[in-house]
């Protein structure tokens, strides 16, 4: 029985065509769909019991799943794209993420041709397992503050890897704790007693025979993390070196080379390339944000259509909670954000692939913008997604707090995305630096790409919004100009404030809060612009483009409403215009309502991937919640173990203590 079938009949667009629009192309949709079904139908990938497993059992289970996934990749000759979808649907953080997602890209981006030839075949066949060992106990954000040393010994042509202090212990790298045989270790390069910056080194950690740590290496897991199951399937690790020697050719030498004689040679490659792996991963994290948010939204939307509270007259059905305007005003902007993040991630991937090609050809001019976009969008989308998942939990009322809703584990596994791969505030400050630099160069350098609007800063500073009616907001030009004016005005105002400081660094530190707000407004502009650009493309299917247009306006006008203080303070909008935007938003929610279930069905998620009783495709929530309760181990017996030992004596004692 499909309890949501009436909801599905209400929609006025072609869901199958929307699935293709969400996936990006028919090929991508088919690929993703095949992998989703492969995983959902394979009992090895069962995950309902995960939050109840102890740590050792949990990790062993992850190893079993990873081995099975790898076997499928080999046996079915899956392509890299297929393997990425497989990883997504297996839905279990594992050491393989860091191996494929950071260790291999670090060698690809920072290794010489010779190094790539040696290490990549081993890594890609998984004959070695690698991790990305950058962060230490004492330093994560401040990469130049790392303390691990790599001292060159000219006599033996080797680097000596050493952890001189407790705070220099590597701390956090995923896959390090129990599984990696190798790591790309970031350390201070010391040659002839001089410090030459932080560089990456390939270091073997464990024996390829019996997996025991090599001499001089202390390595282990850092312990339990937030939530049950969740990110505890990952062996985040600690690592210390006691004068461990590695051959000279294991320093990643695309950026700088150390000769046998101990001379440092700089190539034409900028030193920022040492941070290049982070650009790649941040881009994948933006794509993952749309997946995580859409998943939470799918659960909350389906459940909001099933759940009824109040409003029953003459014995008729109560009101579906999705029909409450307050519920819509919390849920629909998140639905719109999921689509917005999906499309901006599609754009970001193409930007990244373009930069990657250029970097391979030693062309570095677009790297700063790629860094600003990946850092800023990683920060913006992960913050919104983490907050959004928690909001979805609240939207599901009490039942959202049950593990079987899928939301607690999704939240626990997702929230470190606000911290890893760059703390979100630290990353926004990087965007702010880029913007301040762009503004300061306006006189002699034409801004391009995502900062092109700064080239029109004079007119953006003067012109105010011309919107007169709520309908007037349904105009891409009006909306984009509002976001451009807000971002440009905030950036210029901040640059003017900065100029008052004699020392720019002091000014930057003092104005950091405002600078983060400038960066956020710039990143929101990018997301809004890319959504409108997506709508310029050919999007086939009855009603698909129209539904996406509605979501695009919901996303933009919701942000405008939320940040109306900025729009008003910069003088671009009047209070009347801001309230017209809010009135339009209410109308838009009414347009989303009949399509809400179809819009989440368009994510095409299997019940396995959603992992939620509340979000079941058939909406059969109550019987399944009831059944699931009885499967809890506490209900194996009527009288629980421990009762006779610890509770019954109290009960008996109370019979005699009448004075209480
Ligand atoms: C189930 C089984 C399946 C089996 C098989 C599956 C197969 C699957 C195939 C593929 C799967 C792929 C999976 C991918 C998943 C990946 C999951 C990842 C999980 C997450 C793990 C998390 C890992 C980490 O956290 S790693 C550590 C990250 N650390 C950080 O991010 C540190 C943050 N700090 C910094 O970035 C920097 O230190 C800083 C930028 C904040 C400061 O640097 P600085 O001191 O040098 O300061 P400046 O501000 O002066 O900067 C100097 C200069 O450099 C420019 N810059 C800075 N950063 C960058 C950059 N990244 N790129 C380019 N340029 C950069 C900056 O702008 C300055 O430039 P100027 O021109 O102004 O000088
Ligand atoms: C689950 C997980 C997995 C991880 N995996 C890896 C991995 O595989 N490899 C790896 O190397 N690392 C990994 N990390 C480490 C991660 O990259 C760092 O934790 C992250 O970069 C943040 O650095 P930090 O811990 O030093 O935070 P800190 O920099 O100490 O941040 C603490 C606070 O200080 C603030 N702050 C710091 N600097 C500034 C500043 N300049 N201005 C204003 N505020 C500031 C931050 O905003 C934050 O509020 C992982 C972390 C987690 C949680």
Image: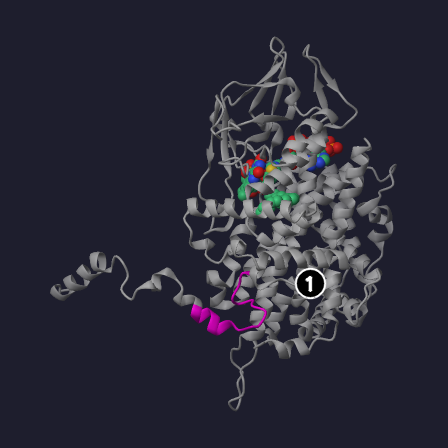
Position of the N terminus, as image quadrant, is: bottom right
| Residue 287, placed above or below residue 140 | below
CB at mark 1 closer than 8 A to ligand 1? no
Tell me the colour scheme of the image. Answer: one colour
Magenta region includes residue 625: yes
Quadrant of the frame with the C terminus: bottom left
**Residue 434 makes an appearance in the image:** yes
Mark 1 crowdedness (10 Å alpha carbons): few <14, some 14-19, many ≥20: many
Q: Is residue 576 visible?
A: no
Q: Quadrant of ligand 1?
A: top right
Give the residue furthest to the front.
75
Residue 377 screen position, x and y as percent: 69, 48
Picture residue at 53% right of the left edge, 77% below the top: 308
Q: Quadrant of residue 369?
A: top right
* Magenta run includes residue 559: no
Span shown in magenta = 611-627
Between 95 and 590, which is closer to the camera in this rendering? 95
The residue where tag 1 is placed is 336
Q: Position of residue 290 (x, y in %)?
A: 66, 55
Looking at the image, residue 563 sits to the left or right of residue 459; the answer is left
**Image position, residue 534 (x, y; %):** 80, 58
Residue sticking out furthest to the bottom: 314
């Amino acid at each position: 029985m499909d309890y949501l079938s009436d909801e599905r009949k209400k929609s006025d667009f072609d869901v199958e065509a929307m699935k293709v629009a969400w996936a990006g192309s028919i090929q991508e949709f088919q690929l993703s769909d095949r992998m989703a079904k492969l995983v959902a139908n394979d009992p090895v990938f069962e995950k309902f019991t995960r939050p109840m497993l102890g740590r050792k059992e949990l990790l062993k289970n992850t190893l079993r799943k990873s081995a099975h996934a790898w076997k499928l990749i080999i046996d079915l000759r899956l392509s890299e794209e297929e393997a990425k979808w497989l990883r997504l649907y297996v839905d279990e953080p594992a050491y393989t993420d860091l191996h494929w997602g950071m260790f291999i890209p670090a060698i690809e981006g920072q290794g010489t041709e010779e190094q790539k030839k040696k290490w990549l075949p081993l890594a890609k066949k998984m004959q070695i397992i690698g991790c990305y060992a950058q962060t230490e106990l004492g330093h994560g954000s401040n990469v130049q503050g790392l303390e691990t040393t790599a001292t060159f010994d000219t006599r033996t042509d080797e680097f000596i890897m050493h952890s001189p202090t407790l705070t220099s212990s590597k701390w956090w790298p995923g896959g390090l704790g129990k599984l990696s045989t190798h790591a790309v270790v970031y350390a201070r390069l010391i040659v002839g007693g001089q410090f030459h910056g932080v560089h990456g080194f390939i270091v073997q950690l464990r024996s390829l025979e019996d997996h025991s740590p090599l001499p001089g290496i202390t390595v282990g897991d850092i312990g339990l993390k937030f939530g049950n199951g969740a990110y505890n399937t990952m062996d985040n690790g600690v690592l210390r070196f006691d004068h461990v020697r590695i051959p000279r050719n294991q320093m990643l030498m695309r950026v700088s080379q150390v000769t046998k004689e101990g001379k440092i040679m700089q190539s034409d490659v900028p030193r920022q390339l040492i941070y290049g792996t982070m650009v790649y991963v941040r881009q994948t994290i933006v794509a993952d944000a749309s997946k995580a948010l859409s998943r939470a939204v799918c659960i909350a939307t389906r459940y909001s259509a099933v759940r009824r509270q109040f409003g029953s007259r003459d014995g008729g059905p109560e009101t579906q909670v999705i029909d409450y305007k307050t519920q819509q005003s919390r849920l629909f902007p998140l639905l719109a954000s999921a689509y917005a993040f999906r499309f901006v991630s599609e754009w970001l991937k193409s930007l990244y692939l373009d930069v990657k090609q250029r970097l391979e050809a030693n062309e570095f001019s677009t790297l700063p913008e790629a860094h600003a976009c990946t850092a800023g969008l990683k920060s913006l989308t992960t913050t919104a997604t983490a907050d959004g998942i928690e909001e979805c939990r609240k939207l599901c009322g009490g039942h959202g707090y049950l593990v079987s809703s899928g939301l607690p584990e999704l939240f626990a596994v997702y929230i470190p995305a606000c911290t890893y791969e760059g703390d979100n505030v630290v990353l926004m400050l990087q965007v702010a630096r880029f913007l301040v630099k762009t503004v300061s160069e306006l006189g002699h350098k034409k801004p391009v790409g995502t900062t092109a609007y700064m080239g029109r800063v004079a007119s953006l500073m003067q012109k105010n919004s011309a919107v007169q009616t709520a309908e007037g907001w349904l105009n891409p030009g009006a909306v984009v100009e509002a976001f451009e004016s807000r971002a440009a005005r905030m950036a210029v105002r901040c640059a003017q404030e900065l100029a008052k400081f004699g020392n720019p660094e002091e000014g930057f530190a003092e104005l950091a809060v405002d600078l983060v707000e400038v960066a956020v407004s710039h990143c929101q502009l990018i997301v809004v612009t890319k959504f409108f650009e997506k709508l310029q493309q050919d999007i086939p299917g009855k009603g698909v483009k129209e539904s996406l247009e509605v979501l695009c306006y919901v996303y933009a006008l919701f942000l405008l409403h939320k940040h109306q203080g900025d729009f008003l303070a910069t003088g671009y909008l009047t209070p009347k215009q801001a309230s017209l935007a809010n009135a339009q938003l209410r109308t838009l929610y009414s347009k989303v309502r009949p399509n809400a279930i179809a819009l989440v069905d368009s994510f095409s998620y299997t019940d396995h991937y959603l992992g939620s009783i509340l979000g079941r495709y058939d909406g059969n929530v109550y019987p399944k919640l009831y059944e699931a309760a009885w499967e809890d181990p506490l209900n194996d017996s009527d009288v629980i173990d421990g009762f006779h030992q610890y509770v019954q004596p109290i009960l008996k004692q109370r019979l005699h203590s009448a004075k209480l």
